[in-house]
Amino acid sequence: MSFFATHEELLDRAQRAIAERVYWSAYPESPSPKVWGETAAPDGKAAFEALLGHDFPLSGSGERVAPEKSPFGIDLGVRYATTPAAELIANASAALPAWREAGVQTRTGVGLEILDRLKGRVFELANAVHATTGQPFVMAFQAGGPHALDRALEAIAYAYVEMTRHPRTATWEKLSRSSSRQGETTREAFTKSFHVVPRGIALVIGCNTFPTWNSWPGLFASLVTGNPVIVKPHPGAVLPLAITVQIAREVLAEAGLPEDVVQLAVDTREAPIASELALDPAVKIIDFTGSTAYGEWLEANARQAQVYTEKAGVNTVIVDSTDDFAGMCRNLAFSLTLYSGQMCTTPQNLLIPAGGIPTEAGPKSFDEVVAGVKSAVEAITADPAKAVELTGAVVNDAVLERIDAARSLGEVVLDSRALDHPAYAGATVRTPMIVSVKDGYQTECFGPVAFAIATDSTEDSLTIFRKTVGEKGAITAAVYSTSEAVLDEVERAAQEVGVHLSENLTGGVFVNQSAAFSDFHASGANPAANASLTDGAYVASRFRIVQSRRPVPAAPAA
Amino acid sequence: MSFFATHEELLDRAQRAIAERVYWSAYPESPSPKVWGETAAPDGKAAFEALLGHDFPLSGSGERVAPEKSPFGIDLGVRYATTPAAELIANASAALPAWREAGVQTRTGVGLEILDRLKGRVFELANAVHATTGQPFVMAFQAGGPHALDRALEAIAYAYVEMTRHPRTATWEKLSRSSSRQGETTREAFTKSFHVVPRGIALVIGCNTFPTWNSWPGLFASLVTGNPVIVKPHPGAVLPLAITVQIAREVLAEAGLPEDVVQLAVDTREAPIASELALDPAVKIIDFTGSTAYGEWLEANARQAQVYTEKAGVNTVIVDSTDDFAGMCRNLAFSLTLYSGQMCTTPQNLLIPAGGIPTEAGPKSFDEVVAGVKSAVEAITADPAKAVELTGAVVNDAVLERIDAARSLGEVVLDSRALDHPAYAGATVRTPMIVSVKDGYQTECFGPVAFAIATDSTEDSLTIFRKTVGEKGAITAAVYSTSEAVLDEVERAAQEVGVHLSENLTGGVFVNQSAAFSDFHASGANPAANASLTDGAYVASRFRIVQSRRPVPAAPAA
């Protein structure tokens, strides 16, 4: 049975999901042994540990490097082969024709089979994501495994729909009454073939914090649309993508296709390779997640390529009123604490009227609202052993520097605390801080820093929201209000500045989280990102249709 | 009945057509009175003539200008109001919110109603296209009227499919077994709303040769996706787009929407306005048809916008063999002669083996093949009265200069002749020339100039084809061969360099023509154009989806 036939039912189901956008998930998010089997977790951990301190089993023509440094202080020491950029490009170019000729179904089948094998190594991947990013383990499992697989499947489903919206061939027949020859009917008939052709070579530039979740959608969208992909991980989080590439090459080889359709490009902080790859004329698609500065550099300079970027933004919460004050505070506290605020979706600016807000327990002053969030953060971070399972570890020193710098921006309502990690002596752990500020909140402060901003009114909050998100962008926005009118108004403002909006989250859904097949992640409609995971625009420009028309011989006379 | 309801059946039919890609057309292409009524043609001509020498009935805050000069020498003298760029932008920005809020169906209905009224003025438009472009009348009617309407409807259908592929709202409900509270099931439910939001202001920059056919697809695609559109015609062909804008504003006003959703930006060769508009930060979409130099300038400089360009290319014909030598020569001759080669789809390079080709009448030498095409051109251009109904008139002096320059590039096999136009004493008419060259054919020579190039073999022809089309692009390519293997090989090469291919055209279908709803025009896969009329990629990035999620209140306990 072909890979495509094996996974066709899943693909059909995913196609339905992206059209319906109700709850659906293809990969179980619980790491429970009841779901994955008793040995899955220990086997995955053992497989991960077996990689440490060794040469990763992917070859390359350059020297081996071990650029990763775990935020938990785990001694990784995985040595990856490097390959010069020109050689990667040459390999990808050589692999392109066979990959194009393989056709839509074969390529889609290969993509789906890779996902299936990634699923089979999901605990190994979870350990790799955990160790390289500093994510707490359950989050590394969920976001790095099932949720990332869902997003990848979603991208494949969109790409498949787009590639198959036109028939592969059509018979075009036109009968016309000849104007020159009285009454005579002329017939023109053609067989038209519509070929899906790739743009060229695709480059995926991974980030340190979400190496699989943020890289897989672009990787698989480019791949199944016919573009050989060069995967360039962040030097801090190579392993999850090295495993990905290893699996991809295994599947390609089994399918009798060139392994170089997917290649790993490892570099180091000292000798980066991304820009050389990005500027190569053969590179026609780039997916990037990371800093605004580098994203904008790519957009400005990699002009030969279709560039998809997710950059920084100023995520904003408008607090107007609530009928569940405790729920609001708990929900916000969780959002601020999760992975120490190192998510592109973590709220940063809390816009609260200086005069306070109405709640189910009567009016709360600005200070009481901020104190409510503060207490909720304190409650979930009080026990270090439990806290670290939310915060994880700090991914790099720049985050620590931003925490320090934030102290001078205003009144520190809640300071960030360093916690000892019970399992990892070398981990750098920080709890969220809340600073009440009048200024300095207008750009992204990546890390566990939230700003409480006293506004004149909810109208004023909306003005600030429109201005900061309009100018700097945002991946997420949230509002708390008991007024339908206010919710509607914020919804309109969110459309204006192009940001997705979560309303009155008080339970177990958080603004940081987007559900594949239902929620769009980033909109492409504000400066924080120029694309969305996943919509038609995300896949449609990754390939082109090239057509031929060949005459159908005239039918023999009756 | 709403505009949408009025035209919904047509829209449904068009949606089916773009998915099936068999023959279909919504607007009759014959100018016959049997189709349009006895008075349609004279009424349209009278309406056109009534505009000449007058102020066009669209207001503006600047001076009036009359920049058009008819290639037929028709005295146009239509005076158009100008408006400063900043004012056009301000008007469009002010119109945007209402147009966005109008929603997908209302906007689509407005677009379809505009098409219907354009159809009602199709003979007036045909006269306007004829007079401003130099197209012969029947071509001006067909390409400027029904075929352009078909292309516009096609763009609306694609945009509508893309905007409605996701539901407007969905209920998302997730039940999970709580891990902390034994056995307890938690429910999270949200109503999710998916809003289609525009990119911003759209700018359409028209060309002199096909003011409606090349402008309408982008105009209507941007319009129905929510973007106010500024239409900037070529100063040589304002009238067809002025009529378009006039109708659009009429329909908008009737729908109670801001007329400034569609505005006309008239300029002159001496005081061009396109670049100022293109660089405005509020302009987020640009559609351009014209020179490579200006197209590349837009791509490089209008970086805030999604830029769709159709530029120059080197259209190529590979002649390998034929079983209908006369049909091949006739078909090529027609393609070279139509509108004096002033189509972006006109063949330029004829690649013919120096050793000749096999035909049904035995081998033909290179010289005999070229002579066959030459004779066929001579046959259809012998009678000036008939010839001018194919050639039309020369659109500007640069075409004449290129004809002169081409003479020195090689051996002139057939020289271009000046013809007197029986109806227009002031017309500049030129028949096609054929020059046998060894070099100088690698860039576009826009106008009635074809190059015959002797190649070592069909393999060599393919090498030249790959190189010239790969480097300079092409909108069309054609091949003549009796060998399936050769056809397949050329088809593969066409996929490699990303150009649409017509095979063995010997009858009444010509390489210059693409049929809406079936043929894609340009591919976006080679340097001649970065987009295709029309595919998913052409519409998907003209809008974004912005989502909101609002909790569904818990159902009362049973």
Image (cartoon, coloured by chain):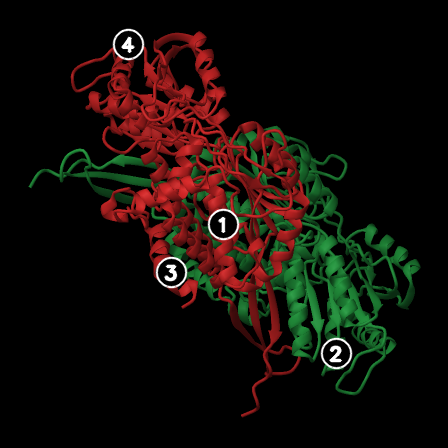
Chain colours: A green, B red
Residue bearing mark 3: B7
Q: Nearer the viewer, mark 4 or mark 1?
A: 1
Which residue is labeled 1 in the image?
B246
The chain letter for the residue carrying disc 3 is B
Question: Which one is closest to the eye, mark 3 or mark 1?
Answer: 1
Q: Chain of mark 4?
A: B
10 Å crowding of disc 2: few (<14), some (14-19), many (20+):
many
Mark 4 = which residue?
A: B367
- Residue A233 percent across, percent down from the top left: 65, 44
Front residue of A189 and B4: B4
Label 3 residue SS? helix
Q: CA distance from mark 3 to mark 1?
A: 20 Å
Q: Residue at x 29, y 11 (%)?
A: B366
Q: Chain of mark 1?
A: B
For the point 76% across and 81% down, the residue is A326
4 or 1: tag closer to the N-terminus: 1
Q: Do callouts 3 and 2 point to residues on the same chain? A: no
Q: Amino acid at mark 1?
A: Gln
Labels 4 and 2 positioned on one and the same chain: no
Placement of A101 over or under B387, stated as above or below: below
Residue in front for this viewpoint, B172 or B86: B86
Residue B476 in the image: x percent, y percent?
39, 30
Hey, what amino acid is under mark 3? His
Residue type at mark 4 is Asp
Which chain is mark 2 on? A
Instruction: Determine the secondary structure under disc 4.
Output: helix
Q: Are the residues under badges 4 and 1 in a single subunit?
A: yes
Residue A321: assigned label: 2
Labels 4 & 2 near each other (Cβ < 8 A)? no
Residue at the image point whose x is 64% and y is 66% from the top: A492
Q: Are marks 3 and 2 in contact (CB under 8 Å)?
A: no
Within 10 Å of disc 4 (Cα), the crowding (few <14, some 14-19, many 20+) is some
